[in-house]
Image (spheres, rainbow, N blue to C red):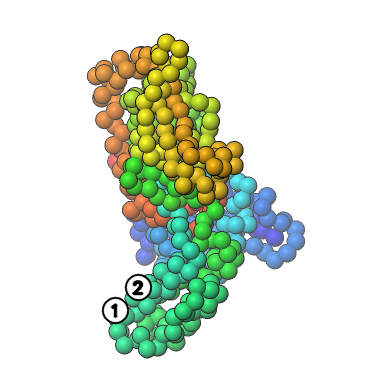
Amino acid sequence: MISIQDEFNLSPLSVIYDLIVPKNNLLRQINDLVDFSFVFDELQSSYCHDNGRMAICPIRMFKYLLLKSIYKLSDVDVVERSQFDMSFKYFLNMTPEEDVINPSSLTKFRRGRLKDNQLMDLLISKTIEIALEKDVIKSRSIIVDSTHTNARYNHKTANQFLQEKSKAVRKAVYQLNPDFKEKFPTKPCSSDVEEELTYCRRVIEAVEQHSDYADIPVVKERLNVLKETIEDFTIELSYSNDKDARFGHKTADHSFFGYKTHIAMNEERLITAAIITTGNKNDGKHLQELVEKSKLTGVKVDTVIGDTAYSAKENIAYTKERQIELVSKLHPIISNGIRSNNEDFVFNKDAGTYSCKAGHLAKNIKREITGQNKRNPRTRYMFDVEKCKVCPFKKGCYKNGAKSKSFYVAQKSTEHQEQMVFQESDQFKKMARERYKIEAKNSELKQRHGYKKAIASGLFGMQIQGAATIFVVNLKRIIKLMNEK
């Protein structure tokens, strides 16, 4: 069952909040700014209303997730801090003496209550609604870009990941007492995952038997991470090899394994739309969806600012049709070429070449001229067939025994003449200088809110993390803009 609303329980001790949680406290400001009843309205269909035990109010559970994003805490650590941090309890609408939830409830809430809800769009829309009510949005342009997030488990074997987390615990303890090594269990000699799990559990037991070490924050935080890793691994044995994550490339020499968040942001630095995909997806393909999502929130869009990834022919046509100025420099390859109708190959603007469905980059590029009169220039992108032979996506793409795998792009040098003229104008150059703002926003997401690495496995977990993080970042920005007025 679910309660109708999240109410403050009457308690004579609640007066403490007025004494120790100042008005300029971030959590108090967020509570004053946002009416969180919309969370209940959206999630109540995920609960039973007339049967079973009384569930914890979804508003409170959602606020726990926000606290995780604001302070970069694990499930265990955010619950523990909520036990003694009065600003946390105030934010959660708890009385000072009220007990906290069991950390496992957060996992159940994420997986059982948030599925099948367009949480990202809902939360962004809510923040933009608040910003419009507070009259802090004046601009009519958006800046688009993507930022990458490494998968939680990277591309490692289960043993490698478990070993990494148990090593972090041992290292923290050794810094306090180098002689503690004798109290740890013997490391397993085989590559059996079950033996590694048993070893990790024994490491936890060895540390927890000595509370003088286990209660020290640096050790306790790493213990909690190891516990969550064991729990996640027990629930889904493939977690150490994230099935949704893909390889993407920031440059020709630098790749990552994980996800991309495609972002639209206005000049007030509020994120107006976001789309989360696997790491191998092309940036430019999401421009139109980002613009439409931004419009649905109530934002007016006259100008779109982005890097060369967004200068594809279809994006130029789309913006021109809607009388939107596209401030995106043409790339010599993507702007002048027409590729064959194969969605499995996408242009990677950072690496300057095409990548296949598996995320592998073309290793060689060759310019060719075909046709009866040699008037049809094209570019040939050649892939490493050794990778193709073992690729899980080779069916329908690579024929067994083939000595080469190529992808062709036909060139047309006069395709974007109007855009070429526009990008040389003073107006284009002036607006292009605003693009740095989204780079700063990407840095804020990663450095201050833990968006550099996924906290859960799978695309769904990444979507939940992204929704909560962007919601928090937007609220912080709105509060700052209101204080500057």
Quadrant the N terminus occupies: bottom right
Question: Is disc 1 in contact with disc 2, using a CB cutoff of under 8 Å?
Answer: yes
Residue drawn where x is 26% and y is 24% of the image? 429
Q: Name the mark on residue 22.
A: none
Residue 53 position in % (x across, y down): 70, 66
**Residue at the disc numbered 1:** 175
Secondary element type, mark 2: helix
Q: Give the image location of residue 332, x and y in percent.
A: 33, 25
Count of numbered marks: 2
Q: Residue at x 47, y 37 (%)?
A: 404
Q: Which of disc 2 and disc 1 is earlier in sequence?
A: 1
Instruction: Quadrant for residue 416, please give it.
Output: top left
Of the pair 412 and 310, the residue shown nearer to us = 412
Q: Is residue 176 above or below residue 107?
A: below
Visible residue check, residue 211: yes
Q: Which amino acid type corresponds to the residue marked 1 in the rendered image?
A: Gln
The residue furthest top is 373
**On the rendered image, what quadrant is the C terminus found in?**
top left
Instruction: Please give the name of the residue rendered at 48% of the width and 82% of the height, measured from the top-left corner.
Output: 202
The disc label shown at residue 218, or none: 2
In the image: residue 176, left or right of residue 65: left
Q: Residues within 10 Å of mark 2 (few under 14, many from 20)?
A: few
Residue 114 horizontal/vertical position (percent): 59, 52
Residue 200: horizontal and vertical position, in percent? 48, 77
Secondary element at image label 1: helix
Q: Residue at coordinates 26% horizontally, 18% vertically from top-left?
A: 424
Comparing 229 with 144, the one in front is 229
The amino acid pointed to by label 2 is Val
Q: Nearer the viewer, residue 46 or 207?
A: 207
Q: CA distance from mark 1 to mark 2?
A: 10 Å
Q: Nearer the viewer, mark 1 or mark 2?
A: 1
